[in-house]
Amino acid sequence: MKAKKATKDLKKAQSLLSAVVEKWIDITPEAQELLTAAKDSVRQALAVMGGKRSLGFSSKAEPRHQTGHNSAERRTKKRFTDEARKKLSILAKKRWAVAKSRGARSLAG
């Protein structure tokens, strides 16, 4: 795994652990201790990765700052709405009706 990807994955893990700790209301002391230990381990790994970068690795390993929406919002934007899905279904049925009237067994033919 390349240093850039490892750093990115570690930062993602760190943010996920932080989110779990913040959102989990009924957390037991044992779970709190384990999550804290995991968060510390990830933080230490990031520090080691950062140390390697400063010893001569290029600055390209720095994470890029995202502008605009995060990836989860982009994924949901690209999905079809119910209305669009319905229109596509109707158009597909019309194409099949035309193809069947010509005696085609598939739309490709």
Image (spheres, helix red, strand yellow):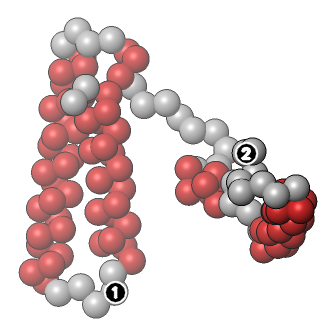
Find residue 35 and report its image quarter: bottom left
Q: Residue at x 34, y 60 (%)?
A: 16
Q: Residue at x 22, y 30 (%)?
A: 1
Q: CA distance from mark 2 to mark 1?
A: 56 Å
Residue at mark 1 = 25
Q: Can residue 92 be seen in this snapshot?
A: yes
Coordinates of residue 68 in the picture (x, y in percent): 67, 44
Find residue 23 and report its image quarter: bottom left
Q: Residue at x 11, y 72 (%)?
A: 33
Coordinates of residue 36 in the picture (x, y in percent): 17, 65
Which mark is on residue 108?
Answer: 2
Secondary structure of the residue carrying tag 1 is loop
Q: Earlier in the sequence, mark 2 or mark 1?
A: 1
Residue type at the position of mark 1: Ile
In the picture, measured across the screen, residue 73 lies left or right of residue 60, that is right
In the picture, measured across the screen, residue 109 lies left or right of residue 27, that is right
